[in-house]
């Protein structure tokens, strides 16, 4: 059984290989991997928007140039002794039309699993980021079992991460059907209270109204502890480690509150024996300021500082 300790402390290279829109997003520079390793992180999560770089007709071939970009990210992490989680990110079509897109989703995993089959065990797969919409829990449980079987045909032992429907929300964990496979573990995303973590986020309706909302104090901390205690209890009941694969607060929130919330979630996750990955490295939730070439110290401390937080 994979253990939580193996993933440890992580950070997402978000808005890079998963970038939406026409732009390239965050360039995955080698020195960013140096920064992450030197700061003391154990893991990077590499969100990848494969569906925007693969053919729409069978055999749904992934663009070779894009595959090489992913290879480079994987190699950069492994070369530095980091663990790396590769997911399928922003596959909106699958969430909108699961029956129609299912063969293409499985074909993506067939290609990804074959490509990385010989890689070290420090490379982990995550089947799908934030299933939602028409991909209800019932449908997702069926599709994830098929995708796992596709991965297992090429790679019998690699650790595979799965999260529940409803955008990997902790509340949906009870609906997740965990396959009988000892190298599967669970993930959730933690963005609560959403009105705090997503205040001012352009892609969330009504988020402008939440601007100025602070976070801190005994009641706020107790809410985080209660939420994460339920996640940890699910993990214990199901005998599965849980990875909080995303948590973070958007840059429009005030930095003191962001640091307090981040420190609280991280400390509580660690106390409960869960691994985690902050959302994200260098863009709109960024713990690292790419323009100045330095960590945002309050966030770095919240993530990696001592327990005197
Ligand atoms: C999405 C990002 C978003 C983040 C926080 C991620 O799963 O891919 O686009 O910024 O969640 O909402």
Image (cartoon, rainbow, N blue to C red):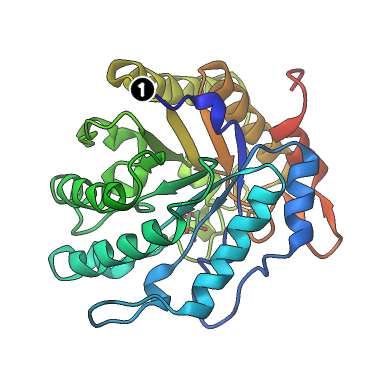
Q: Is residue 63 above or below residue 272?
A: below
Q: Quick one: 226 or 131, which is closer to the camera?
A: 131
Give the percent coordinates (x, y) of residue 293. 85, 59
> Does 109 sit left or right of 289 as displayed?
left
Give the percent coordinates (x, y) of residue 172. 27, 37
> Does 181 sit left or right of 294 as displayed?
left
Give the percent coordinates (x, y) of residue 154. 32, 52
Q: Name the residue located 57 percent from the left edge and 29 percent from the top edge.
A: 265
Q: Is residue 89 above or below residue 222?
A: below
Q: Is residue 271 visible?
A: yes
Q: Is residue 97 visible?
A: no
Q: Name the residue located 60 percent from the left edge and 52 percent from the top edge.
A: 250
The residue beneath circle 1 is: 235
Q: Is residue 239 above or below residue 120?
A: above
- Name the image quarter holding the C terminus: top right
SS of the residue under disc 1: helix
Instruction: Determine the image quadrant of residue 308.
Output: top right
Instruction: Determine the image quadrant of residue 271.
Output: top right
> Does 62 sit left or right of 259 as displayed?
left
Q: Name the residue located 46 percent from the left edge and 56 percent from the top edge.
A: 116
> Does 308 sit left or right of 249 as displayed?
right
Extreme residue in the front direction? 118
Give the percent coordinates (x, y) of residue 106. 25, 62
Q: How many marks?
A: 1
- Name the image quarter holding the N terminus: top left
- Label 1 crowd bin: few (<14), some (14–19), many (20+), radius 10 Å: some
Q: Quick one: 123 or 195, which is closer to the camera?
A: 123
**Is the CB atom of the residue marked by disc 1 within 8 angstroms of ligand 1's nearest atom?**
no
């Amino acid at each position: 059984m994979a253990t939580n300790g193996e993933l440890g402390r992580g950070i997402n290279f978000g808005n890079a290989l998963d970038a939406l829109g026409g732009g390239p997003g965050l360039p995955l520079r080698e020195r960013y991997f140096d920064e992450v390793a030197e700061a003391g992180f154990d893991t990077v999560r590499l969100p990848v928007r494969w569906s925007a770089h693969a053919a729409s007709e069978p055999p749904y071939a992934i663009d070779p140039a894009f595959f090489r970009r992913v290879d480079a990210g994987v190699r950069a992490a492994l070369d530095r002794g980091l663990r790396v989680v590769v997911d399928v990110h922003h596959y909106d079509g699958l969430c909108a039309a699961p029956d129609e897109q299912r063969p293409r989703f499985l074909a993506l995993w067939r290609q990804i699993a074959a490509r990385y089959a010989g890689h070290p065990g420090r490379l982990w797969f995550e089947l799908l980021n934030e299933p939602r919409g028409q991909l209800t829990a019932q449908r997702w449980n069926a599709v994830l079992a098929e995708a796992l079987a596709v991965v297992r045909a090429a790679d019998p032992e690699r650790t595979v991460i799965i999260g529940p429907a409803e955008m990997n929300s902790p509340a949906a964990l009870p609906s997740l059907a965990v396959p009988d496979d000892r190298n599967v573990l669970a993930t959730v995303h933690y963005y609560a209270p959403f009105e705090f973590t997503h205040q001012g986020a352009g892609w969330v309706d009504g988020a402008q109204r939440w601007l100025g909302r602070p976070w801190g104090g005994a009641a706020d901390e107790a809410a985080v502890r209660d939420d994460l205690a339920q996640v940890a209890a699910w993990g214990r009941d199901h005998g599965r480690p849980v990875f909080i694969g995303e948590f973070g607060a958007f840059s429009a929130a005030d930095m003191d509150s962001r640091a307090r919330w981040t420190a609280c979630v991280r400390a509580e996750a660690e106390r409960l024996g869960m691994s985690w990955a902050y959302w994200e490295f260098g863009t709109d939730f960024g713990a690292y300021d790419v323009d100045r070439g330095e960590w945002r110290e309050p966030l770095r401390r919240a993530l990696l500082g001592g327990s005197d937080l």
